[in-house]
Image: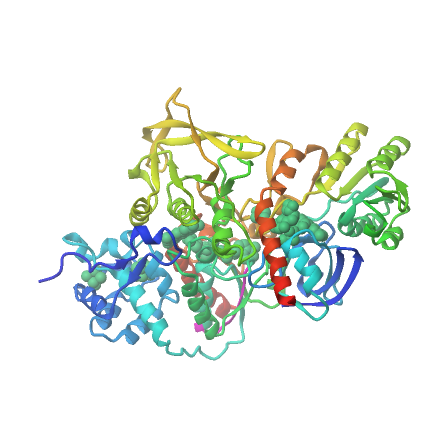
Amino acid sequence: MHQILAKQALGPEIDEFQVEAPRVAQAAVPGQFVVVRLHDRGERVPLTLADWDAAAGTVTLVVQAVGKTTREMHERYDVGDGVLDVVGPLGEPSVLVHEGTVLCVAGGVGIAPMYPIARALKQEGVRVIGILGARSEDLLFWVDRMREVCDELVLTTDDGSVGRKALVTEPLAELLGAREVAHVWAVGPAVMMKFCSATCSKAGVPVTVSLNPIMVDGTGMCGACRAEVGDRVRFACVDGPEFPGDQVNWELLIARLAAYKEEERCALDRYRRMVREAAS
Amino acid sequence: MIRETQVAMREQSAASRVRNFDEVPLGYTDEEAREEAARCLQCKKAPCVQGCPVEVDIPAFIGQTERGDFAAAAATIKRTNNLPAICGRVCPQETQCQGVCTLAKKFEPCGIGRLERFVADWEREHGAQAVEPPPSTGLRVAVVGAGPAGLTCAADLRMMGHEVTVFEALHEPGGVLMYGIPEFRLPKDVVNYEVDGLRRLGVDIALNMVVGKTITVDTLLSEGYGAVFVGSGAGLPRFLGIEGETLIGVYSANEFLTRVNLMRAWQFPEYDTPVKLGRHVAVVGGGNVAMDAARTALRLGAEHVSILYRRTRQEMPARVEEVHHAEEEGVDMQFLVNPVQLHGNDGVLAEAECLRMELGPPDDSGRRRPVPIEGSEFLLDVDTLIVAVGNQAHPLVPRTTSGLNVTRWGTLEADDDGVTTRKGVFAGGDIVTGAATVISAMGAGKKAAAAIHRHLAGG
Ligand SMILES: Cc1cc2nc3c(=O)[nH]c(=O)nc-3n(C[C@H](O)[C@H](O)[C@H](O)COP(=O)(O)OP(=O)(O)OC[C@H]3O[C@@H](n4cnc5c(N)ncnc54)[C@H](O)[C@@H]3O)c2cc1C
Ligand SMILES: Cc1cc2nc3c(=O)[nH]c(=O)nc-3n(C[C@H](O)[C@H](O)[C@H](O)COP(=O)(O)OP(=O)(O)OC[C@H]3O[C@@H](n4cnc5c(N)ncnc54)[C@H](O)[C@@H]3O)c2cc1C
Ligand code: SF4
Ligand code: SF4
Ligand code: FES
């Protein structure tokens, strides 16, 4: 059992959790994730390590409520509660670059996984420019933390409630045109990573993305997470999750993410019914 | 006069069992067990014992069973086999102990597996006698993987007095017994009970520990473990490498079975993990894994399940009993058929393009090689395709441990005693042999335990 030591709302349906997981905290490096199972009927869901503290033995997870499990975490898991399983750190570490200017483009809840990467790049002595985008101001979080590890920071929102009223690809394209950029990281929703990758390809700048396909075990034994990267089938959980964005078959990734739509709706409806019944 | 045939075991009828996940064979009654036990000739140089990789004292336990002393029979088996209820159910007895049974020369062999199952079940129902492990030697051993190889190695080392921690990547111990072999063939309660037996002995099982990620073998050795046994299995699924294999609706057998068994998707939505199954299911392969996948698909409600195998019935690696059960339940066997391309609609599997095959001359394995018949392409309507063409050694531990030699098949190099190329590191089971059997993995775990004991004694 892994105790939740802190929980903080970062946005309407986005929470930051501090969870006890000493072994994971000791071994974690940027780019990796954990698989979490809330209870003995729970699904195994992958969540990126947004931060960790080896001395305190804790990991930080930032979770957006999108379906049954993440909603359950949002509504029913609080400080003092235990999470049954936290497995990791899983996946390959980010392959960092060591000089020049790097753009770190994060969309929505992708800001959380981007933070440790940007921090590590900064420690390498790289000039880090962050571009953070969200639909609106209330969905933007960790701006201060990102500012600490970025030399420059650009904010965008779809509705213009804060920063530029634009998609992240706009400042990305401008910066790629104006500066000498060594490498780009893009982390966020699949569609956002797809367009960022296209923008980078056009500018001839290498781009790394973090894929988020559906996973089961997260240790390479099932193949649920397979993605096509440069004509090869790769298992995102053990070969990735980071891959060169220009080589990813995005249509496939996006289609596979929707494979369980009906079942996910069924699980969520059932969960909502249970919550309602428990309340009445 | 000796009975020529085995006492039959009652089983659920095919019609009722395809609608549930309950176990198919129902086990012997006390009388049936004693009647079957009476068939044993009590051979002096019992060949059956040599046929068993863990050398169960078969004539002794069968004699005790015949006399009705089931508790003693259980104790006899447990001396060399810590997982008898599992072995009694899934060992390929026809090629192991029963294959060399003296009775088999003229009649049906003695039903050793069925009797072993009976005795183990009897003990579970009546409460096991507590076994006292010897006092601790203070020496610690780490075991990687809680499959049959790791569990057996751990139990033996514990009985030699060593302190053992098993590190398991998944959230439940058992390996393939838990995530691969379905409930209707090996109830998970049975596995849990036998694993709990090890815990009662004082074996520590640390779950959710991915060795190579959470902790490495090198760290274990430097953290005070005197030896490490690697039993991480052959968990890497092989795909066909044909176009369309990433379509939605295409599963590896591992994914399909893991969702259903380990994650209990057959009880979705009471359990959170779903499995998506179409009406027309094709399973590619001809081994036990393919049979398990096909029979599972039927139970989940598929209308039509076929097995596509590129050779013929004679070459099928699956146990005869499994093929028989699958056919009884309505699985449609299609021999000499091989899928070559998968077609989809909007990213979802719709058709499998297959070729008909014929058997050519024998290949390296001695089996006749299937060769495609030119121009024999045909389309099969399928919305789910499960690839069950074998698993390879899991690469994580070999890849993250220094000094371990790997063969060209990705398996770990180790001798008969499990000694690897790295001092203090031993290995056995599927990670060394490639996908094999529960009992051979257990045999390897046993030999390695003895070798580790010698290693620890020698310092
Ligand atoms: C490597 C990796 C890192 C991730 N990091 C984070 C993170 O830091 N924060 C965060 O909020 N989310 C993260 N995700 C996504 C997160 O795993 C899913 O949102 C979560 O599994 C949804 O589960 P659910 O039951 O709440 O929703 P469901 O209703 O089951 O699904 C909602 C959506 O999530 C996706 N999804 C469902 N099950 C899985 C699964 N087992 N694995 C992956 N995706 C799934 C589906 O495509 C679906 O569109 C990550 C995913 C991966 C693969
Ligand atoms: C569907 C199916 C049906 C089968 N049916 C039969 C049958 O009827 N009869 C029979 O005799 N055999 C059968 N087999 C084969 C048999 O199950 C295997 O040969 C046997 O389980 C091998 O045992 P093992 O201990 O070597 O490995 P496994 O059972 O594979 O166990 C390995 C364990 O190690 C864990 N592990 C892997 N990597 C790591 C890591 N890095 N860190 C920590 N833990 C790790 C895995 O999670 C797993 O729990 C079947 C196999 C399958 C897949
Ligand atoms: S363990 Fe398996 S091989 Fe050995 S006696 Fe029992 S059934 Fe036969
Ligand atoms: S070989 Fe057969 S008959 Fe002889 S002791 Fe063994 S089980 Fe009994
Ligand atoms: S999630 Fe199973 S192999 Fe990647």
The picture quadrant where one finds residue B33 is bottom left
Q: Residue at x 76, y 48 (%)?
A: A110
Q: Compared with residue B307, is residue A79 higher up or lower down, i.e. above or below?
A: below
Q: Is residue B393 visible?
A: no
Q: Which of A206 and B156 lies nearest the eye of the viewer? A: A206
Q: Is residue A269 visible?
A: yes
Q: Is residue B179 left or right of residue A206?
A: left
Is B165 inside the magenta-drawn segment?
yes
Q: Which of A170 and A72 lies nearest the eye of the viewer? A: A72
Q: Residue at x 32, y 49 (%)?
A: B322
Q: Which of B161 and A108 lies nearest the eye of the viewer? A: A108
Q: Is residue B311 left or right of residue A42?
A: left
Q: Residue at x 65, y 34 (%)?
A: A251
In the image, farthest residue toward the left: B1
Q: Position of residue A152 (x, y in %)?
A: 91, 45
The picture quadrant where one finds residue A126 is top right
Q: Position of residue B143 (x, y in %)?
A: 52, 63
Q: Is residue A7 left or right of residue B439?
A: right
Is B210 inside the magenta-drawn segment?
no
Q: Residue at x 60, y 49 (%)?
A: A264
Q: Which of A75 and B413 lies nearest the eye of the viewer? A: A75
Q: Which quarter of the image is occupied by the N terminus of chain B?
A: bottom left
Residue range in magenta is B159-168
Number of numbered discs visible in the structure rendering: 0
Q: Position of residue B453 (x, y in %)?
A: 46, 68
Q: Position of residue B163 (x, y in %)?
A: 52, 72
